[in-house]
Image (cartoon, rainbow, N blue to C red):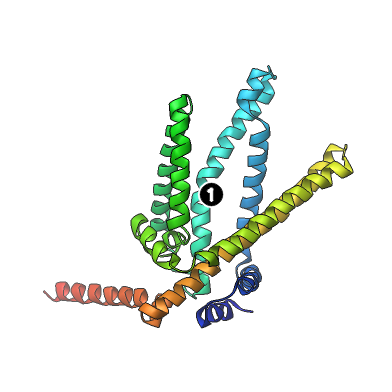
Amino acid sequence: MSLENVREKLMEKKLTTLEYFGVAFEAFKGFWKENPVMMVSMFVFMVVSIVIGIVHSELNEEFLVYYGANEIMILWAKIFNVLNAVASTVSFFVTAYFFRKVALMIEGNGKNMKLKELFLKTLILSVIFFVAGIIGNKMENSIIGSIFLIIFSIVVLCVALWAFWYFEAYYIRNFGLMESIDYSLELSDGNRIRKFLPGFFIALGVLIFIIMTRIFFNVLNIENFAAGLIIAFVFVMIFSLLALYSQILNTVIFLNVEYDYLGKNLNKELKFGSENKSNENNQILNDNENKNKADNG
């Protein structure tokens, strides 16, 4: 199935949960065929990020210092602290880029990425999370602060479950932060279960995968370090492919729900950004006319 056929299926009707998985898999294969460079790049980034995260969690700097580890181990812990921070920051933009690229390629508008706008959007989110992280770390040092953090986390979770089901709009469409939240709320009306069920099955699959991985290593009791490392790396690659598929699945669900919403409220042309293209063409014509008038004047 080509990406054009994927688009037609998403426009045709509201899909069931099983249909979402099937269409997402066809899109997943289509992207590997039509844009292998992007998919390979995303895959490598996922693998590297996961490996850095695993090593960072194992090389806890405070833990090593407390137990008097040698200076080389502490140095490696510091290096992976930095690498993990960099990977986490870059992942904001990479994730946003992938969401938008997938959506626009399905819509046949893959060249209209507007990377500068996308970078500013991800920068805003990065700053918000960075500031929240600093405040959270400061408040953890007191009992009152810890209690407040627990309450605040519960409130944030409730708000997220209420309003952020279709927040992909922030990355994919030309909306600001508050506009994206409002749009997500509109799309969520009667459609939360469409996001919940696939997400639940993916999360369940990941949980089973992690449990099976631990059982696999415990049963084999691998003593050879190199063999264990190779097997672990294979599992990381499988998990990375699953993460890529999951992001495409989320985009497929978003587009299907949005197309249904737009079909009831707006002209079909908006589904493929025709209005945006028309506006851009009109703007170009107006600029040329103004330029000609200035030259003639």
Left or right of 2, for residue 140:
left
Of 16 and 297, nearer the camera is 16
Where's the C terminus, which quadrant?
bottom left
Is residue 94 in sight in this rendering? yes
Would you place residue 202 above or below residue 130 in this image?
below
Classify mark 1: helix, strand or loop.
Answer: helix
Residue shown at 43% from the left, 40% from the top: 152
User: Residue 220's image quarter?
Assistant: top right
* Residue 65, position as x, y percentages in the image: 63, 20
Residue 41 appears in the figure: no
Image quadrant where one finds the N terminus: bottom right
Location of residue 187 in the rendering, given as x and y in whole percent from the top left corner = 43, 67
Q: What residue is at 40 percent from the left and 75 percent from the top?
A: 273
Instruction: Give the image location of residue 271, x and y in percent.
Output: 43, 77
Is 155 drawn above or below residue 292 in the view shown? above
Could you tell me which residue is drawn at 67 percent across and 20 percent down? 71
> Number of numbered discs present?
1
**Image location (x, y in percent) of residue 141:** 48, 24
> Residue shown at 51%/73% (left/top)?
256
Name the outermost residue toward the top. 68
Residue bearing the label numbered 1: 91
**Of the pair 293 and 267, the residue shown nearer to us:** 267
Query: Image check: 79 left or right of 150?
Result: right
Question: Splitting the image into 4 quarters, where does residue 144 fall?
Answer: top left
Above or below — where is 115 with respect to 158? below
Q: 138 or 276: which is nearer to us?
A: 138
Q: Amino acid at mark 1?
A: Ser
Pointer 1 local density, CA inside 10 Å: few below 14, some 14–19, many at least 20: some
